[in-house]
Image: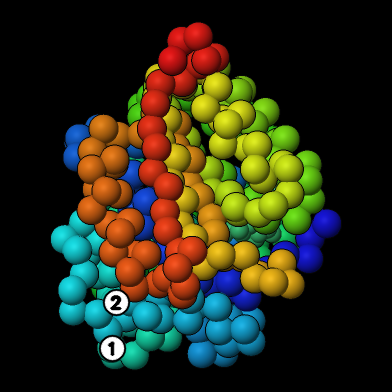
């Protein structure tokens, strides 16, 4: 089923959490000179206009990047995320919001590699066009080529399936982001299976999974299942902007689960999550969960 279009949700509270954590993970990998590979199994369109098209319909960005835009009290650890979004909007007006591939492209260096997968025929077309525009702009500026070089490879295909062939990456340094729509129950199962397989092929890799926090059983049990995978360590962070709505509609809470996270991430999140709850929280049920531990079956923990 391919009805999901990320444009409807661009810049909402879930994107803020996901892209903030993603930038932290990439920046950590960039601290060493050796190249690394970023694999985005569910890439989306790459860049979204907030003032037109899908994003303007429900204006979900008003639950996320909107309230953060003019804040003057941004915590230091959150500044890289805000600077990146502001850099895409040089006029100062909030018009564009980057998807995960754009965030990665901005943070990553010449020597690093981006491998992007997208299944939706319209989204992959827009993703390709967005990166071609970047290429053209870079060429005009005499800078590096992105799409046509080896650095960025965009593929139409099933990200879960395609992941296997790319692990481990050549430099044995890498990050995988798995960010499916979860419109079908099977996405929950496929996330777990892909991670099990991914950890066998690339035990030292960092794997990040975005997930919605919903009442449905598959959603509630996902983090517990991921804690038992054979990673060295894990970190789980959720952000809730409110309690569930009476009609049960709308996403008010989501999480990022990271296998083999950098050791610095926990402290960064301790600083930033209370701030995000303060700025984005809508009622007394707003809050965050932050937990970490060693991977493997309970006996190992
Ligand atoms: N990661 C993107 C970001 O943060 O900007 C958002 C991705 S969106 C939540 C999920 C995307 O996965 C959609 O664009 C959808 O078309 C795509 N998709 C769904 N199933 C897929 C699959 N099996 N393989 C690759 N892409 C898939």
Residue 213, above or below 163:
below
Position of the C terminus, as image quadrant, is: top left
Which residue is pictured at 34% across the width and 65% down the height?
276
Q: Do the residues labelled 1 and 2 touch (CB within 8 Å)?
A: yes
Q: Quadrant of ligand 1?
A: bottom right
Please report the residue visible at 54 percent of the width from the left and 14 percent of the height from the top.
297
Q: Position of residue 40 (x, y in %)?
A: 53, 47
Residue 54 tag number: none
The residue that disc 2 covers is 86
Q: Which of 46 and 224 is in front in this view?
A: 224
Q: Mark 1 points at which residue?
A: 92
| Res 223 quadrant in image | top right
- To which quarter of the image does residue 77 belong? bottom left
Q: Earlier in the sequence, mark 1 or mark 2?
A: 2
Residue 60 in view, yes or no: yes
Picture layout, residue 22 above or below residue 144: above
Say which residue appears at 18% left-offset and 74% top-offset: 73
Q: What element carries label 1?
A: loop
Q: Where is residue 267 in the image (x, y as percent from the top left)?
A: 23, 43
């Amino acid at each position: 089923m391919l009805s999901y279009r990320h444009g409807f949700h661009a810049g909402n509270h879930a994107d803020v959490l996901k892209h903030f954590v993603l930038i932290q993970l990439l920046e950590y990998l960039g601290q060493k000179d050796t190249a690394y590979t970023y694999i985005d199994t569910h890439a989306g369109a790459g860049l979204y206009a907030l003032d037109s098209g899908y994003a303007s319909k429900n204006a979900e960005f008003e639950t996320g990047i909107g309230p953060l835009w003019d804040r003057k009290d941004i915590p230091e650890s959150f500044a890289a995320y805000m600077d990146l979004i502001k850099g895409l909007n040089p006029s100062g007006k909030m018009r564009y919001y980057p998807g995960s591939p754009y965030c990665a492209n901005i943070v990553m260096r010449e020597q690093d590699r981006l491998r992007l997968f997208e299944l939706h025929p319209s989204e992959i077309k827009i993703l390709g066009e967005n990166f071609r525009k970047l290429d053209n702009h870079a060429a005009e500026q005499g800078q590096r080529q992105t799409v046509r070089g080896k650095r960025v490879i965009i593929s139409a295909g099933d990200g879960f399936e395609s992941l296997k062939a790319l692990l481990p990456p050549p430099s044995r340094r890498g990050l995988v982001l798995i960010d499916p729509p979860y419109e079908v129950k099977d996405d929950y199962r496929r996330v777990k299976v892909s991670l099990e397989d991914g950890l066998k092929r690339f035990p030292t890799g960092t794997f990040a999974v975005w997930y919605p926090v919903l009442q449905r059983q598959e959603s509630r049990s996902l983090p517990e299942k991921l804690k038992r995978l054979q990673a060295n360590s894990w970190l789980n962070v959720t952000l809730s902007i409110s309690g569930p709505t009476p009609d049960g509609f709308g996403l008010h809470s989501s999480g990022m689960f990271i296998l083999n996270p950098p050791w610095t991430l926990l402290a960064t999140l301790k600083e930033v999550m209370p701030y995000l709850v303060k700025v984005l929280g809508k009622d007394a049920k707003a809050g965050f969960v932050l937990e970490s531990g060693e991977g493997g079956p309970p006996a190992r923990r």
